Amino acid sequence: MTSYLVTGSSRGLGLHFVEELLKTPENFVIASVQNPSKAAELQTLLSKYPKERSAPESIKNAAVEVSKLLPEGLDVFVSNAGVNFQPTAIFEELSCVTSLLGSIELAEGMPGLNDSYCVSRAAPNMLIRKWGGALSHEGTTTALVHPGWVPMTEIGAEIEEWMNKYAPNFARVTPHNSAAGCVKIFETVTIEQTNSFWNYDGTNLPW
């Protein structure tokens, strides 16, 4: 059994990550949301699985509940929202969903595109890279994953006008294909590949 904790699971790619992970019966999936009562799509999805349980909304209490469910520790933490646990938490893999907009090397080729968002992605990219250097000695694998441009998500839709004007040939990705590609990386990345930056299709991206 492989255990996963996915943050930001109420909608968008977080919801699709949970759906994709649940396709493997051996997976133990914990979906984290701010307000479960408003996560209608997630509730519909989880109604198909009899082992669904609710957990407290606060980070501290949720961590306690997770430790009860997984006394031997969490295998994979998928950071898909703006909330994170301390790096000393017990898990074997830390996968952070980020964006190629946080790539310093690619930045000059995207002038005027969501400058503030690019900066907000570059900062956690640096944090994960630093954590990776420390956690690799403890056997924890860290990886950054870019889910592709998914116009059907909230963030993807916000840059559609810019993309259509300046990058009309840039590949558009469906939520299903993005989630499937990301989950494949979650499941196969190894300690030898720690601190890697991945595109959803399995190719590497520049820092």
Image (cartoon, grey):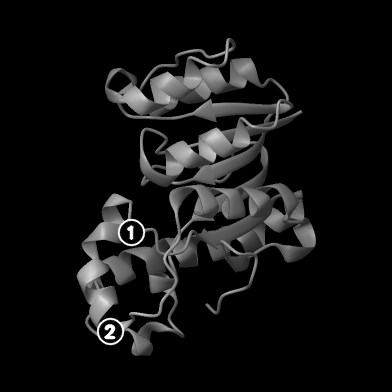
Question: Does residue 12 lie above or below 101 as drawn?
Answer: above
- SS at circle 1: loop
> Where is residue 130, by image quadrant?
bottom right
Lower sequence index among marks 1 and 2:
1
Q: Can residue 198 be seen in this view?
A: yes
Q: Give the residue type at disc 2.
A: Tyr
- Left or right: where does residue 29 sit relative to residue 114? right
Residue 134 on image: x %, y %: 65, 58
- Left or right: where does residue 39 sit relative to residue 79? left
Which quadrant is the N terminus positioned in?
A: top right
The residue under label 1 is 151
Question: Does residue 172 lie above or below 185 as drawn?
Answer: below
Q: Can residue 84 be seen in this view?
A: no
Question: Does residue 102 lie above or below 184 as drawn?
Answer: below
- Left or right: where does residue 47 sit relative to residue 49? left
Q: Out of 90 and 109, give the one closest to the viewer.
A: 109
Q: Out of 143 and 154, give the one closest to the viewer.
A: 154
The residue under label 2 is 166
